[in-house]
Structures are given as C-alpha cells and as structure tokens.
Image (cartoon, rainbow, N blue to C red):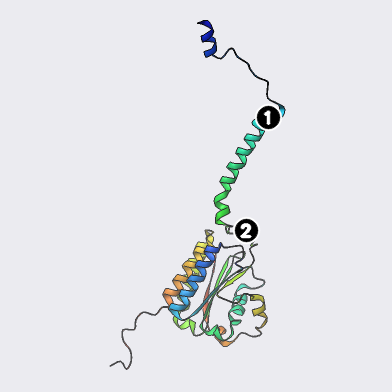
C-alpha cells in the first residue's frame, strides 16, 4: 500500500487506526490529506472535501500542506453540528504547533484525538419528552 | 644466566621477515578505513531505522497521501465541478506554522 515517503509503516498504521476509531466513535468520516497543493490551499481543501460526494456532509477533512506550512480543516454541513469551528480551530492550532517542531505523525494523531473528543457528544442530561 | 635475561627482554631470536606491502596497506589503511565505515554506519543507523523526518522550511519531496480518502486524489478532484452545499455550508478552520 503506498504510504508516501513521509511516514514509516508504523506511523501510517497508527494514523489509519486513529481515523478508524474516530469514525467509530463519532459517526463522522475523518480523513487526512498530506501533500503539496497547487493554487490556493483552502480552495483545494474544499474541492477535496467535495470530491467525497454523498459522504461530504458527514466528512471532516484535514489537509496538511507541509511546504506552504498550512493546515486546513473542512467540515461538512452535518459534521459541523458536532465539530464546530471553535473545536476545529483548536485542533488545527495544536497540529500546527507539532508540525512546527517537525513532528508530522504526532501532530496528526493528536489532532484526530482532539477532534474525536470534541465531536463525541457528552451524555444528554435532559431530553425533551423523556418524562 | 645472562642468556636467560636476554630472552626475557626479547633481544634475541629470529625477527622474521618484514611485512609485505600488501600487509602494510591492510594494517595501516584497511583497518582504520573499516573502523571509520563501521562508526559512520552506527551513527546513521538510528535515522535509517526511523525513516525520513519532516523539517519545516525544506521542500516537500515525499509526494502526497490521503489517509481515509480515495487513493487517487487527483482523479477524485476531476469529478468536482461546483462545490455542493454539504461543503459550502460546512465549516472548519485554518492554521499556519
């Protein structure tokens, strides 16, 4: 399986595992793209998100541009309800801090973990119509 | 008695023939070079095992990878003409480092 040259097999496995458990816990479709991008980074991230087709609404795409040193998180309109922009900003900030120190895999893993925690809803204490 | 003392300090006996030039080269050049190579290998071994490391500011040569997405990102992008509402009405965040 092609991994690119940026990650060891072990790191790639860890990232895949983190993505899989993030999906299982939140019901959202997490994915991470790392690579050089031509043109505007945000536009590219939006197009990549759109290319997920029917899954886009539930998708959380993280695009990492190591050369331009940019992180972009794109959430679909339904995914945004559980992972709001504030939580995404917090995760992107945490990731960029790790990347600045040269730790790509660690930053990605940490970012996924943060987004998973934010998107996992706390147990509802009060529900309408429960009584 | 005097002869025994001489033997002990090694001043008698057959000195043997000298080293051939091949032996000389092996001992004085071959062994140091081999030692240097082994030390160099041991120094670089950890980074060889760890694999390439990302350094901010250096050009990115590692290509691209999309974990959890399609294996052919370029192909997937071709299918996008306009951004659907699922994307435009979504949100997200950006950061730089």
Secondary element at image label 1: helix
Query: In the image, residue B86 lies at what x, y percent?
Result: 55, 86
Q: Are marks 1 and 2 in contact (CB under 8 Å)?
A: no
- Tell me the subunit letter for badge 2: B
Of the two numbered discs 1 and 2 in the rendering, the one whose residue sits closer to the viewer: 1
Query: In the image, residue A13 lies at what x, y percent?
Result: 52, 67
Quadrant location of the N terminus of chain A in the rendered image = bottom right
- Residue lying at 44% horizontally and 81% vertically, measured from the top left: A82
Quadrant location of the C terminus of chain A in the rendered image = bottom left
Query: In the image, residue B73 lies at what x, y percent?
Result: 63, 75
| A107, above or below B12, in the image | below
Q: Is residue B3 left or right of residue A121?
A: right
Q: Earlier in the sequence, mark 1 or mark 2?
A: 1
Depth check: give the residue in front, A86 or B49.
B49
State the CA–CA distance, disc 1 to disc 2.
47 Å
Displayed quadrant of residue B80 = bottom right
- Tell me the subunit letter for badge 1: B
Depth check: give the residue in front, B69 or A91.
B69
Q: Which mark is residue B58?
A: 2
Circle 1 residue: B23
**How many callouts does the rendering have?**
2
Depth check: give the residue in front, B37 or A97.
B37
Q: Is residue A112 left or right of residue B84?
A: left
Q: Residue placed farthest to the right in the image?
A: B21
Secondary element at image label 2: loop
Q: Residues within 10 Å of mark 1 (few under 14, many from 20)?
A: few
- Residue lying at 71% horizontally and 27% vertically, measured from the top left: B21
| B68, above or below B10, in the image | below
- Residue lying at 61% horizontally and 65% vertically, measured from the top left: A4
- Residue lying at 60% horizontally and 43% vertically, measured from the top left: B40
Q: Residues within 10 Å of mark 2 (few under 14, many from 20)?
A: few
Q: Are marks 1 and 2 on the same chain?
A: yes
């Amino acid at each position: 399986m092609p991994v690119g040259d940026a990650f060891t097999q072990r790191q790639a496995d860890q990232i895949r595992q983190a993505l899989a458990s993030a999906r299982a816990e939140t019901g959202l479709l997490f994915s991470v793209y790392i690579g050089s991008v031509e043109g505007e980074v945000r536009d590219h991230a939006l197009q990549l998100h759109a290319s997920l087709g029917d899954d886009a609404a539930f998708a959380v795409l993280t695009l990492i541009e190591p050369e331009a040193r940019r992180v972009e998180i794109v959430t679909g309109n339904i995914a945004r309800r559980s992972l709001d922009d504030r939580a995404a900003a917090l995760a992107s900030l945490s990731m960029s801090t790790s990347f600045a120190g040269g730790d790509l895999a660690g930053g990605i893993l940490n970012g996924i973990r943060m987004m998973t925690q934010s998107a996992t809803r706390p147990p509802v204490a009060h529900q309408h119509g429960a009584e | 008695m005097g002869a025994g003392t001489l033997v002990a300090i090694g001043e008698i006996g057959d000195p043997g023939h000298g080293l051939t030039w091949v032996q000389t080269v092996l001992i004085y050049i071959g062994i140091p070079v081999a030692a240097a190579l082994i030390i160099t290998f041991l120094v670089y071994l950890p980074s060889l095992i760890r694999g390439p490391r990302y350094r901010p500011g250096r050009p990115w040569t590692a290509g691209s990878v999309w974990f959890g997405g399609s294996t052919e990102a370029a192909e997937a992008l071709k299918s996008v003409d306009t951004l659907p509402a699922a994307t435009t009405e979504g949100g997200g965040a950006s950061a730089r480092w």
